[in-house]
C-alpha cells in the first residue's frame, strides 16, 4: 500500500525551503481559475520566503500557441505575480518550457521501460474505444485492459521493427494510494480503478501526468497547489514518484470557482480572460484581493487586503473545500474601493485612453476636474465613459424629466429662463463655481427652494436625472456650452 503523509503543516514549514509552481498550458488565455491558482501559490510561497516558478506546459503541440503564452505572461505580470524562475528570466533548472525538455523525459521514460515499470502498448484507437464501450456497458470503470502489459521482448521488437504505432503505458501497482491533502485531509484511491495509463506518445514525447512528475522533481518543487479537478491525477503522479524513487510532494487542491447558480462558470458569470478584465477597467490590486477571497476565508469580517497583507495572513487551514462562488458585484465593489483610494493623477492617467478611443478631446485640467467629480461613482475604469460622456456630448432626453417632482412645467420654464439670463451676465473668464454660486443662492430663494432650481438645471446640463451638482458641471462645460444646453432645455419645455 502506497502512502504519503502531509508532514509540512503551516506550523512546521521551514523558511526558504518552499518551492511552488504555476504551470499553465498555452492552449488558451489566462482565465480567473488559473490566475487564482497562481495567486495562492504565490502568496503561500512568499509567506515562507520560498521560490515561485513559472513553467509553460506546451506538450500539446497542436493546440499550443505563442499568443496564448504571451497572454499568460502578460496577465501574470499585470497582476504582479512575478516569478523567481521561468521563461524570459531563466533559473537553475531551465529550460522552463516542456517542449524544450524532451531529452529529460526520454531519460526517465527509458528508465521505467528498463525496470519493467512501463511498457509499449500497440493497441489501436479502435481497439481502445471498443474496450471502453464494453466496460461502460457492463457498468465497470473504463480502464485499459492490459492487453499489451506482458508482451515478450521478441513480440515488442517485432512490432517496433514493423513500425507499428504505439504509446507507452505505466504499470499501476494495483494497490491503494493514500495521501493527506493540505486542504481536504486524508484521501484514498484504489489504483485498480485507475488502470495502466499512457505516459508518453513515444520515448521523447511525454503526456501530462508523466511530464509534470519529472519536471516537479527536476525543478525541486515542494508543494503542488492546484484546482480540485486535478485530484484524480494525484494517485497517478504519486505512483510515478514511487516508481522513479522521487520524493512525494505536498498536495493542496483548491475548490473550483462556480457561477452564481453553483454550476460551471459561464461568460455571464465572469469566465473571461484576465487581460479582458484589465480592458474593462478592473485594477490588478482589486483582482488580487477578490481572487484571494475565492475559497480562502481570513476568519474575520475584513475584505480588503493588499498583496503584502495576504502574504502575512494566508494559511491553508482557512481554505474551504466547497466550491467558491464568483460574484461579479463583489468584484466591482472591491474595485470601486481601490478606485476611491486612488490619487487623482493616477486615475486620470487610467481614464484618459478611454476618452481618446471614443474620440473625445480633453486637456489634463478638464480631465482631472471630471475625474474628481465622478470618482465616487466609478466601479471600473471603463465606466468613466458612460458616466462622463455628457461632458462631451449631450444625450437626448424627454422634456418631462426637467420638471422637479414637486413642481410643474411653468415653474421649471421660469426657473431656467432666470438662470439663463443671470448666467449670460457672467464674464467668460469668471464662469466658475465661485461666481455662479451666489446667483443660484438668490434664485433658490426667489423660486422657493433648491429643488426648483437645481433639478431642472442639473437635467439641462447632464441630460440625466442623476449626475454631479450642476455648478460643478457648468464650470467644466464652460459658459458657451452651458448656455447652449439651457436653451435646448427651454425649447424642450416650450414644446410640451
Image (cartoon, grey):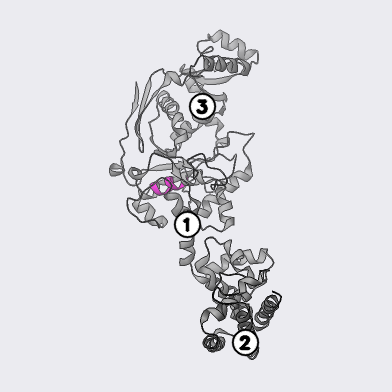
Numbered mark located on residue 418 in the image = 2
How far apart, in angstroms, are the residues tagged by discs 2 and 1? 47 Å
Quarter the C terminus occupies? bottom right
- Distance from disc 2 to disc 3, alpha carbons, whole Å, reads 89 Å
Image point (57%, 21%), residue name: 167
- The quarter of the picture where the N terminus appears is top left
The magenta segment is 38-44
Secondary element at tag 3: helix
* Mark toward the start of the polypeptide (2 vs 1): 1
Label 2 secondary element: helix
Q: Position of residue 170 (x, y in %)?
A: 49, 21
Residue 211: image location, x then y, percent: 51, 31
Residue found at x 47% / y 41%: 262
User: Is residue 154 in view?
Assistant: yes
Bin the neighbour count of mark 2 within 10 Å (Cα to Cα): few under 14, some 14-19, many 20 and up.
some
Residue 122 visible, this orientation: no
**Image-based side of 481 in relation to 16, left or right:** right
* Number of callouts: 3
Which picture quadrant has residue 162? top right
Mark 1 vs mark 3, CA separation in Å: 45 Å
Residue 404 at what x, y percent from top left? 57, 75
- Residue 11 vertical placement versus 155 (above, below): below
- Asked if 378 appears above or below 459 in the picture, the reply is above
Tell which of 118 and 42 is nearer to you.
42
Query: Toward which corner of the image does residue 10 lie, by quadrant?
Result: top left
2 or 3: tag closer to the N-terminus: 3
**Residue matched to label 3:** 107
Amino acid at each position: 500500500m502506497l502512502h504519503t503523509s502531509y508532514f509540512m503543516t503551516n506550523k512546521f514549514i521551514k523558511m526558504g525551503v518552499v518551492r511552488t509552481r504555476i504551470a499553465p498550458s498555452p492552449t488558451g488565455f489566462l482565465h480567473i481559475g488559473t490566475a487564482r491558482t497562481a495567486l495562492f501559490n504565490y502568496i503561500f510561497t512568499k509567506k515562507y520566503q520560498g521560490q515561485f516558478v513559472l513553467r509553460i506546459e506546451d506538450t500539446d503541440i497542436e493546440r499550443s500557441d505563442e499568443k496564448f503564452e504571451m497572454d499568460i505572461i502578460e496577465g501574470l505580470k499585470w497582476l504582479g505575480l512575478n516569478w523567481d524562475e521561468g521563461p524570459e528570466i531563466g533559473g537553475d533548472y531551465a529550460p522552463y518550457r516542456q517542449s524544450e525538455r524532451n531529452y529529460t523525459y526520454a531519460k526517465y521514460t527509458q528508465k521505467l521501460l528498463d525496470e519493467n515499470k512501463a511498457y509499449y502498448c500497440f493497441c489501436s484507437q479502435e481497439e481502445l474505444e471498443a474496450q471502453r464501450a464494453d466496460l461502460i456497458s457492463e457498468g465497470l470503470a473504463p480502464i485499459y485492459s492490459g492487453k499489451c502489459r506482458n508482451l515478450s521482448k521478441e513480440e515488442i521488437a517485432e512490432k517496433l521493427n514493423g513500425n507499428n504505432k504505439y504509446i507507452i503505458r505505466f504499470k499501476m501497482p494495483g494497490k491503494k494510494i493514500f495521501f493527506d491533502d493540505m486542504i481536504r485531509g486524508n484521501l484514498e484511491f484504489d489504483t485498480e480503478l485507475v488502470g495502466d495509463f499512457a505516459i508518453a506518445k513515444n520515448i521523447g514525447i511525454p503526456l501530462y501526468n508523466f511530464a509534470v512528475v519529472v519536471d516537479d522533481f527536476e525543478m525541486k518543487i515542494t508543494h503542488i497547489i492546484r484546482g480540485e479537478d486535478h485530484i484524480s491525477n494525484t494517485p497517478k503522479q504519486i505512483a510515478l514518484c514511487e516508481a522513479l524513487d522521487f520524493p512525494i510532494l505536498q498536495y493542496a487542491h483548491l475548490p473550483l470557482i462556480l457561477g452564481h447558480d453553483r454550476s460551471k462558470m459561464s461568460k455571464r458569470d465572469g469566465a473571461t480572460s484576465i487581460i479582458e478584465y484589465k480592458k474593462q477597467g478592473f485594477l490588478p490590486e482589486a483582482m488580487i484581493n477578490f481572487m484571494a477571497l475565492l475559497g480562502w476565508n481570513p476568519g474575520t469580517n475584513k475584505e480588503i487586503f493588499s498583496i503584502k497583507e495576504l502574504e502575512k495572513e494566508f494559511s491553508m487551514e482557512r481554505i474551504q473545500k466547497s466550491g467558491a462562488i464568483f460574484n461579479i458585484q463583489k468584484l466591482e465593489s472591491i474595485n470601486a474601493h481601490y478606485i476611491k483610494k486612488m490619487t487623482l493623477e493616477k486615475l486620470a492617467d487610467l481614464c484618459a485612453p478611454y476618452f481618446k478611443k471614443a474620440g473625445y478631446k480633453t486637456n489634463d485640467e478638464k480631465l482631472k476636474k471630471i475625474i474628481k467629480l465622478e470618482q465616487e461613482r466609478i466601479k471600473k475604469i471603463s465606466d468613466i465613459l458612460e458616466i462622463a460622456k455628457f461632458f462631451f456630448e449631450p444625450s437626448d432626453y424627454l422634456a418631462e424629466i426637467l420638471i422637479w417632482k414637486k413642481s410643474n412645467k411653468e415653474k421649471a420654464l421660469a426657473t431656467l429662463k432666470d438662470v439663463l439670463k443671470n448666467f449670460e451676465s457672467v464674464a467668460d473668464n469668471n464662469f466658475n463655481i465661485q461666481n455662479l454660486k451666489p446667483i443660484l443662492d438668490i434664485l433658490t430663494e426667489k423660486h422657493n427652494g433648491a429643488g426648483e432650481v437645481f433639478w431642472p438645471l442639473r437635467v439641462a446640463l447632464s441630460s440625466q436625472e442623476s449626475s454631479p451638482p450642476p455648478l460643478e458641471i457648468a464650470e467644466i462645460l464652460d459658459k458657451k456650452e452651458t448656455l447652449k444646453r439651457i436653451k435646448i432645455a427651454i425649447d424642450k419645455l416650450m414644446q410640451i
